[in-house]
Amino acid sequence: MSERVRRNVRVEGVVQGVGFRPFVYGLATRIGVAGRVGNDVSGVFVEVEGTLPQVEAFLSALAEHPPPLAAIERITTTAAAPTGAGDFSIVASEAAGQRHTLVSADSATCDDCLRELADAADRRFGYPFINCTNCGPRFTIVRDVPYDRPLTTMAGFAMCEPCAAEYHDPTDRRFHAQPTCCADCGPRLRLDDDNDDNENDDDNNDNNNNDDNKNDDAADAPGTEPIAQAAARLKAGQVLAIKGIGGYHLAVLAGHEAAAAALRERKHREDKPFAVMVSDVDTAGRLCELDPAAVELLTSRRRPIVLLTRRTDGGTATATATDAATSSAPDAAAGSATGHLVAPSVAPGNRQLGLMLPYTPMHHLLLRAVNAPIVLTSGNVSDEPIAYTDDDARRRLGGIAEGFLTHDRPIHIRTDDSVVRPFRGRESVLRRSRGYVPEPVTLRWPAPRPILACGAELKNTFCLAKDRHAFVSHHIGDLENYETLRSYVEGIEHFGRLFDVDPVLVAHDLHPEYLSTKHAMGMEAGDVELVGVQHHHAHIASCLADNGEPGPVLGVAFDGLGYGTDGTIWGGEFLLADLAGFERVGHLEPVALPGGTAAIRQPWRMAAAYLDVAYAGAPPAGLDVLRRNESRWADVLAIARAGTSSPPTSSAGRLFDAVSALLGLRDTINYEGQAAVELEQLAEPAERGYYVAGIGEGTRVAGADLVRAAAEDLRAGVAPAVIAARFHNGVVDAIGRACLGLRDTTGVGTVALSGGVFQNLLLLNGCVDRLTGAGFRVLTHGRVPTNDGGISLGQAAVAAARDRAARDRG
């Protein structure tokens, strides 16, 4: 008989809330080893005892075949003296000590649960909150760690005997699944009218006192009735508010033009596209072009919104399920886009469509009942954070929605849907939120001391960094109102508590008026060190951290606006940068920003400023943009020339705005970046011509040359779609020539592309092709957004790099 050995094993990573302990228990039982497994503040601890071959087999399987939702970062093993243990057990969690454990993101309903959901013989048939160890809510219901039911918003739902039996049965899929429940003991779904007063609202509204949130026998019985009622209302053209995992959505039938238009009007979202939820990949393929990367993103456990190119046939559906759905409701047939899966008002004038598949059992049930795609957009009025408590939803969405499909499981922290797209065969994240957060971005080089990075003003995220973990937050939004700011502050506190991060360094943007900067300044009185990080350096550092690169690189940071080290407004920058520092080695030639923020809201002002430079103060009189704005043109040029409230800016975003207004696309905007988005949508993809921008001393790129060339083509009668394409190609050419010149002077052959302008696929693809063709290595974003949602990671990476350098010097 082989000699017995014992090993103490530490497993770190995303290993709580993912069925890791039952997995370990089952593995140990199959192999025949003794010992125990449990959760603590650092992850999972295992003590295993058996023969050497048994223990080696156990350790090998532990590393190679973890549960589907687990993400093992490190396994450490130490020898221990055998104790003669004869069995294997799961022991109680240990909550003492400094926390290092990670929390799993919310995960889409797994195939096993979907089979039960559809099985009339199963006791959870049609139950809209079905889940198991391999799927369901995680981050949005966690109040603290270790991840155990009493520390989640499921604490107020006492398990019934059958659920408790499954929970305690090591052979069951729901063994130690913390949110496990059924129709007899779990959350309940109901459909309310917009003016209903629900007697349980006080309990439902308090996400922090969920122990009071007991089941109410008088509530509507869970099952199919609320779903069927909601489906009927959607088919009839109503707008519904639907409570999901991370907050409320607003929904209409996607093919119902009148309903989509009404939602757009009530939500004050004039032009920005809505996301669409479809039941399956086949339906997605009828609407958009799919490749293997797109299918993988759509079907992943994260279930993000995936931006995809629309099919040229527009998703026409003749004699399809959509017609069957709309034909059952007379009002729908009259108001819908006849025979189309997606009405024109869903994504007006956009070549792309944001699609997602159902990710909760409630979504699956609703899509089956409706039998057609639905719009599912954030439950808010434009520019506000999404509603996630019941009272707030009724207050803010009552004037938009005609009904509320809601439930009594509290949401602890609001979390928007994530937005991604496939780019050259891999995932590119544009908004990192539900399904991704709070799983960390792993840093290639550790942070010596804990860091809080406060992020930007727009598309804000924050980041807490400790050791090699950068916990980039869920999407917070634009810090422009009290509710968003409160969400920001509460989020920082929640992350700090979950991951036991007490920051010593606080990184922030240089702009003194950003609310994120002011938050950092408010912490100065405490025992923290402030680290100011220039906005565009943060963009490039974010791209470096995203790719695990130290630099130096030639960083091309093109975005809307960022505060420069010289006190001017930057935005079209060429930086020689590494993680710790940068040198500004080139930029777009600055022009005036007439009226400051007014020029951001009114792109025609940028057209006036650029045309003034391009034509030395005498632009052609026949341009439509001048005629449309003739009454204000001279005044705007006067303040631009005088510099009154007109700071100089090298912003690439404002250059795109100028051309958009020149072509008659957008004189004023309804959402940030709209003019540039519409310019990209207009551009003819097959056009290969390009305009040429002069590049002067100091790699100063003359954007006015591009504007003048576009104006001359416009006067000559060239189609606007061709002009838009030539402008894009001209920007690509200018970036390529600038980088070639900088490579000659610096010897650096790697380029990092970052900033919100590189959300433009026409520009991004063109730059990657041009630069790789010239022999450059090109880094683009994948794990965090290229827009300001990635700024916080860059700030954290810069602060950590400077801290490491200071320690090395000292």
Image (spheres, rainbow, N blue to C red):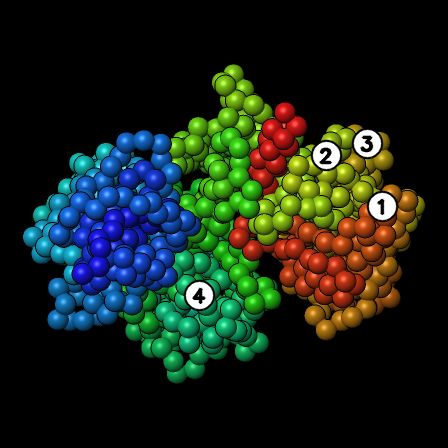
Q: Earlier in the sequence, mark 3 or mark 4?
A: 4
Q: CA distance from mark 4 to mark 1?
A: 42 Å
| Count of all numbered marks drawn on residues in the image | 4
Q: Nearer the viewer, residue 70 or 112?
A: 70
Mark 1 belongs to which amino acid?
Answer: Arg
Mark 2 belongs to which amino acid?
Answer: Gly
Q: Nearer the viewer, mark 3 or mark 4?
A: 4
Q: On the image, numbered disc 4 is attached to which residue? A: 298
Q: CA distance from mark 3 to mark 4?
A: 49 Å
Q: On the image, numbered disc 2 is attached to which residue? A: 564
Q: Earlier in the sequence, mark 2 or mark 1?
A: 2
Res. 13 mark: none
Q: On the image, numbered disc 3 is attached to which residue? A: 643
Q: Position of residue 754 (x, y in %)?
A: 65, 50
Q: Farthest residue toward the bottom?
A: 319
Q: Position of residue 593 (x, y in %)?
A: 76, 39
Mark 4 belongs to which amino acid?
Answer: Leu
Q: CA distance from mark 3 to mark 2?
A: 17 Å
Q: Nearer the viewer, residue 264 or 278?
A: 278
